[in-house]
């Protein structure tokens, strides 16, 4: 049976999950770099990637950085040139959102000689590699003068040097043992030049004296990194010529320069990126966004009310409360197969409620009341808010992100009193298995449940008795008693008349008991309101 092909949305996520983008100026250069790095046999066509131009190709690979796998993709502009590169790279950065990016390829170098032992030798040779983190476009400026006749117009450049620090790139390139690596600034233009010496002379005299490389994309790449927030690893390019009439005389210089570039790139990346596990930033995903609202507006209100000692109330008979000590926590049930449309129809949930006798309850007060279900010691909710994800191209993945982000929230991740967290996320299959197990246990357990009004039959509550554990049963009651004792003590000290008012009396109270008994029977919600009024006044 053949493996099912990934969807365009899934392929897009695969690229987005890779922290490093290696981008070239030409498709052929990307292929050459991929060949040298061993990534040629793992290509991805732009036709299979959601939101990406069909003409793009990606080669997938990874570096071993201090025992951690650093995954990358190699790609390129669809056409050589500073304008085309700026457009294509900006679109890729916007869609793929890489954490790091590095621009690689070939360049022309500044021809320079030095004297050693009475001989002239080149400072930089063909196939050497130039590392840079600053560049400018030497064609920016304006033409002035000229009369259309003998008087020629004069070009006045307006150089804008872009410098994006990458760390210790200079120290890396100039360290002992790396004689074929050089560090310097780039100049970029929109055309291939055979008079590079003119451009170098002007640049070194007026802008940056360490300008040693000429290409067509470096300034655009660095400016994109500066404005998009992508962390630049700089420009790494092999020397294929000197931008003079001798360009092309060495037929192997271009291919060899790309090979040396790939080697230098690998060394530089492993040197500069720490060996940590990089995770995709998914904060802007819709599934993450609605999980925040669901947690803040539902989960937190439910468990805050529970933590303050408020008992769940049966929805059909709101005056009848479930014993707080029977509630262990909250189960959030995810839809079957992570399909956001699974909860779209209320009948789906209604069927489960009837078949397994889930009890509808409310918890909280006033505008903070929330409705949900109760079964065998747990409050239960089916988050129908995820129905809004059904129109997303990667709907199932968005549901997974919804659950993933929920699990990072406080009530899901922080244990209470050395026990499990109050909230848990349940896969549909696990939830149904739990319901079946509970159903079997109910068949052998007495169908009675302790309520605040005594012991009564209740077929819907089911497996409650086993959860009346001594460890947790008294916490809300103890808290309530302490509040009462504290209030009585404070009142006795500050108001003598009030102290006399609560002394035993022969008169009957409204509930047929003396006043202290009335106070002792006040439920948790009344105490909660009492405290709110006390704070207010």
Image: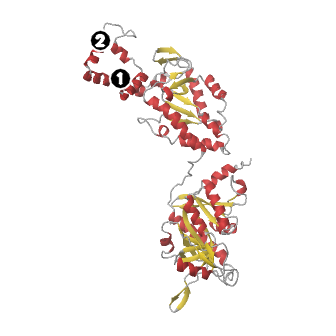
Q: Are marks 1 and 2 in contact (CB under 8 Å)?
A: no
Query: Can the viewer see residue 35?
Result: no
Image spot of residue 487 (x, y percent) = 32, 24
Which mark, residue 504?
Answer: 2
Disc on the earlier residue, 1 or 2? 1
Image spot of residue 505 (x, y percent) = 30, 9
Query: Can the viewer see residue 367?
Result: yes
Image spot of residue 533 (x, y percent) = 38, 25
Q: Nearer the viewer, mark 1 or mark 2?
A: 2
Residue 445 vs residue 216, the one in the foreground: 216
What residue does disc 1 label? Answer: 481
Task: Tell me what residue is drawn at x 67 percent, y 49 percent.
Answer: 9
Secondary structure category for the residue under label 1: helix
Give the residue furthest to the bottom: 118
- Is residue 394 left or right of 176 when viewed as pictured? right
Give the residue furthest to the front: 147
Task: Tell me what residue is drawn at x 52 percent, y 59 percent.
Answer: 67
Quarter of the rendering containing residue 242 = bottom right
Secondary structure category for the residue under label 2: loop
Compared with 121, 65 (above or below) is above
Which mark, residue 434?
Answer: none
Quarter of the rendering containing residue 264 = bottom right
């Amino acid at each position: 049976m053949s493996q099912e092909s990934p969807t365009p949305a899934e392929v897009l996520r695969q690229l987005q999950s890779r922290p490093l983008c290696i981008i070239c100026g030409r498709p052929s250069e990307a292929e050459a770099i991929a060949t040298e790095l061993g990534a040629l046999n793992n290509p991805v066509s732009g036709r299979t990637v959601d939101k990406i131009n069909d003409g793009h190709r990606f080669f997938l690979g990874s570096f071993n950085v201090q025992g951690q796998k650093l995954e990358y993709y190699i790609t390129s502009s669809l056409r050589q040139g500073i304008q085309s590169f700026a457009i294509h790279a900006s679109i890729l950065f916007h869609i793929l959102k890489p954490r790091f990016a590095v621009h690689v390829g070939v360049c022309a170098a500044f021809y320079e000689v030095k004297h050693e032992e009475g001989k002239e030798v080149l400072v930089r040779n063909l196939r050497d590699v130039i590392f840079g983190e600053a560049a400018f476009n030497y064609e920016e400026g304006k033409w002035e003068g000229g009369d259309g006749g003998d008087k020629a117009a004069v070009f006045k450049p307006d150089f804008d040097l872009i410098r994006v620090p990458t760390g210790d790139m200079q120290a890396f390139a100039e360290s002992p043992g790396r004689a074929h690596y050089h560090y310097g600034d780039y100049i970029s233009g929109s055309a291939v030049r055979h008079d590079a010496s003119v451009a170098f002379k002007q640049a070194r005299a007026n802008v940056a004296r360490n300008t040693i490389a000429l290409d067509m994309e470096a300034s655009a790449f660095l400016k994109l990194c500066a404005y998009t927030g992508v962390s630049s690893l700089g420009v790494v390019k092999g020397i294929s010529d000197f931008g003079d009439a001798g360009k092309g005389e060495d037929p192997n210089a271009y291919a060899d320069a790309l090979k040396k570039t790939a080697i230098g790139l690998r060394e530089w990346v492993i040197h500069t990126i720490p060996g940590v596990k990089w995770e995709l930033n998914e904060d802007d995903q819709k599934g993450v966004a609605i999980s925040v609202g669901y947690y803040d507006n539902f989960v937190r209100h439910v468990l805050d009310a529970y933590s303050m000692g408020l008992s769940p109330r049966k929805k059909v008979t709101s005056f009848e409360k479930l014993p707080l000590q029977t509630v262990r926590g909250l189960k959030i049930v995810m839809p079957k197969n992570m399909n956001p449309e699974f909860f779209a129809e209320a009948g789906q949930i209604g069927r489960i409620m009837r078949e397994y006798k889930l009890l509808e309850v409310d918890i909280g007060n006033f505008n903070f009341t929330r409705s949900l279900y109760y079964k065998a010691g747990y409050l239960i909710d089916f988050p129908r808010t995820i129905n809004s994800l059904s129109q997303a191209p990667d709907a199932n993945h968005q549901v997974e992100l919804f659950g993933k982000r929920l699990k990072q929230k406080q009530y899901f991740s922080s244990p209470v009193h050395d026990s499990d967290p109050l909230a848990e996320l349940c896969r549909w299959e696990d939830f149904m298995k739990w319901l079946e197990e509970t159903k079997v246990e109910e068949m052998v357990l007495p169908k009675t449940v302790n309520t605040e009004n005594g012991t009564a039959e209740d077929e819907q509550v089911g497996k409650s008795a086993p959860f009346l554990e001594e460890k947790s049963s008294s916490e809300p009651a103890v808290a309530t008693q302490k509040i009462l004792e504290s209030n009585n003590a404070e009142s006795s000290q500050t108001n003598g008349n009030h102290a006399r008012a609560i002394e035993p009396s022969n008169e009957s109270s409204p509930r047929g008991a003396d006043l202290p008994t009335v106070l002792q029977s006040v439920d948790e919600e009344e105490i909660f309101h009492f405290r709110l009024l006390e704070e207010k006044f």
